[in-house]
Image (cartoon, rainbow, N blue to C red):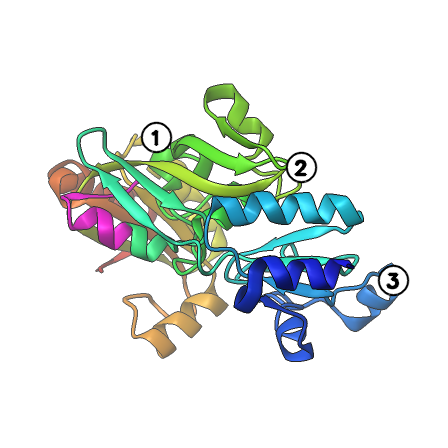
């Protein structure tokens, strides 16, 4: 019996080696010139695709891969822009779309979510219990497992830091096929490792009490003004949840295509904050605008 027969026998309908399935997992949202792929001489087409449903599937999958010395590549929603979820040497592509259960512990303010659940659905589940995410990637429909593996800054990071600054624990299957639970300093083993240290199975995400989000936009004519505005923003010690600065090109695109309250062809500072601190945030923002020559828009 070879690896194909063993995978098919173990995973049944959750296994595929069809060309369509394999090719559909060779790209993410990034653009990498063909010249780069050719120059790197890597094999981005997986030999097999497996859709695990539980932790037992992940354990057996790692053991089979070890038995045949075949590489594994975890794959969430393919929203990454840098090729992180794309195979480099064929092997087994692990699609986490069926590992997506979510529980909310409202007493401890933690969402216990499987790796394939999206941030959007975790947030919806949390809000149904009077809570919400502290921070999440700009790709709201990306997976929790992918977000932890990348450990980037995201929406809400101005107040709450990196994704993994808000992780209570991670349960993963390590390269030996063992389930390990990581907390505290041990989270460094998995956070930002891009799936190279194991397959993330379940994550505990810290939540915050729900509050409607409000926004205010400060618009500047040029970069120099925007730069001054950023300095004034920090000097005011504004308790905002999220801040981002959009340049003229992206501001125009968003304003025209999504009807956002941004000034086209301008530098726009977008500030998001919970409504329960609006009485503190807004006077400070209007003072920043007045001192730096910005026009303001309510979101």
Earlier in the chain: of badge 2 and badge 1, it is 2
Distance from disc 3 to disc 2, alpha carbons, whole Å, reads: 25 Å
Quarter of the rendering containing residue 29: bottom right
Q: Position of residue 150 (x, y in %)?
A: 55, 44
Q: Which mark is residue 54?
A: none
Q: What x and y, as percent, mark residue 31?
A: 66, 68
Q: Which residues are magenta?
A: 123-134
**Badge 1 element:** helix
Which residue is denoted by mark 3 in the rendering?
Answer: 41
Of callouts 3 and 2, which one flags the residue occurring earlier in the amino acid sequence?
A: 3
Q: Identify the residue position indicated by label 1 in the image.
A: 235
Q: Is residue 162 visible?
A: no
Nearer to us: label 1 or label 3? 3
Name the residue nearer the viewer: 150 or 265: 150
* Location of residue 140 in the rendering, given as x and y in whole percent from the top left corner: 39, 58
Q: Which residue has dot 2 on it?
A: 175
Q: Circle 3 — which element? A: loop
Q: Which residue lies at the image location 29% right of the left edge and 74% below the top edge? A: 259
Answer above or below: position of 24 versus 143: below
Name the residue: 74% across, 50% down: 71
């Amino acid at each position: 019996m070879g690896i194909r027969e063993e995978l098919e026998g173990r995973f049944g309908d959750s296994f595929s080696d069809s060309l369509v399935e394999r090719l559909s997992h060779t790209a993410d949202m990034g653009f990498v010139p063909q010249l780069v792929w050719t120059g790197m001489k890597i094999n981005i087409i997986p030999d097999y695709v497996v859709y695990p449903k539980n932790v037992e599937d992940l354990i057996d999958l790692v053991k089979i891969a070890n038995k045949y010395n075949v590489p594994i590549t975890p794959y969430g929603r393919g929203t990454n822009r840098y090729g992180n979820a794309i195979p480099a040497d064929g092997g087994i592509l692990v699609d986490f779309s069926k590992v997506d259960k979510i529980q909310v512990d409202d007493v401890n303010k933690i969402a216990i979510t499987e790796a394939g659940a999206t941030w959007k659905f975790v947030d919806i589940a949390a809000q149904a219990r009077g809570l919400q995410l502290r921070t999440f990637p700009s790709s709201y429909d990306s997976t929790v497992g992918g977000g932890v593996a990348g450990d980037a800054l995201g929406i809400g990071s101005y107040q709450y830091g990196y994704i993994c600054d808000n992780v209570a624990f991670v349960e993963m299957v390590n390269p030996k096929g063992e389930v390990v639970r990581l907390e505290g300093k041990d989270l460094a083993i998995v956070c930002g490792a891009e799936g190279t240290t194991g397959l993330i199975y379940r994550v505990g995400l810290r939540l915050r009490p729900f509050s409607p989000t409000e926004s205010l936009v400060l618009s500047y004519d040029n970069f120099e003004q925007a730069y001054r505005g950023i300095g004034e923003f920090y000097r005011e010690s504004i308790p905002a949840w999220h801040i981002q600065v959009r340049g003229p090109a992206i501001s125009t695109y968003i304003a025209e295509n999504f009807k956002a309250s941004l000034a086209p062809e301008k530098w726009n500072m977008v500030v998001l904050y919970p409504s329960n601190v609006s009485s503190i945030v807004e006077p400070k923002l209007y003072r920043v605008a007045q001192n730096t020559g910005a026009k303001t828009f309510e979101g």
